[in-house]
Amino acid sequence: QLQLVESGGGLVQPGGSLRLSCTASGFTLNYYAIGWFRQAPGKEREGVSCISLYGDSSNYAEAVKGRFTISRDNAENTVYLQMNSLKPEDTAVYYCAATSHDSGYPMMRAYEYDYWGQGTQVTVSS
């Protein structure tokens, strides 16, 4: 069974940093494009960042540009989301998602992905 597992969430003060990890169980991420999404209470799930199958293309939501960096380490079967200069409005449950269909365009919409993790909570508060 294909499973994605997120880790690295937690409580951090404004201006702090966290690095989220997305690993796979039962398959290798090497053959999948990956997206990171987040959902805050009372809000819809939104795309945060995505990275292409080969890691040669990435995209970011305007709200996180310049602060978040997505990367993948295929040898470790892991995709990372480095989050710097965190703000209270970044508070949400963060999910990673995978699809074997890389459209060649930035994929920032939830329906474009087939597999999802359970999420990891990120709370930015003083």
Image (cartoon, helix red, strand yellow):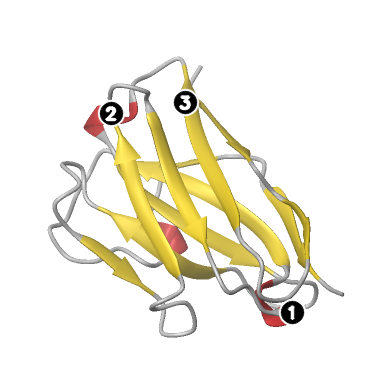
Residue 24 - label: 3
In the picture of the structure, the residue carrying the numbered disc 2 is 74
Other-residue count near label 3 (Cα within 10 Å), few / some / many at <14 / 14–19 / ≥20:
some
Please identify the quadrant where the C terminus is shown: bottom right
Name the N-terminal-most of marks 3 and 1. Answer: 3
Residue type at tag 3:
Ala
Is 90 drawn above or below residue 11 in the view shown? below
Residue 116 spot, x, y in % from top left? 53, 42
Q: Give the Cα distance between marks 3 and 1.
A: 29 Å
Residue type at tag 2:
Asn
Contact flag, marks 3 and 1 (Cβ < 8 Å) = no
Q: Nearer the viewer, mark 3 or mark 1?
A: 1
Residue type at tag 1:
Pro
Other-residue count near label 2 (Cα within 10 Å), few / some / many at <14 / 14–19 / ≥20:
some
In the picture of the structure, the residue carrying the numbered disc 1 is 88
Name the N-terminal-most of marks 2 and 1. Answer: 2
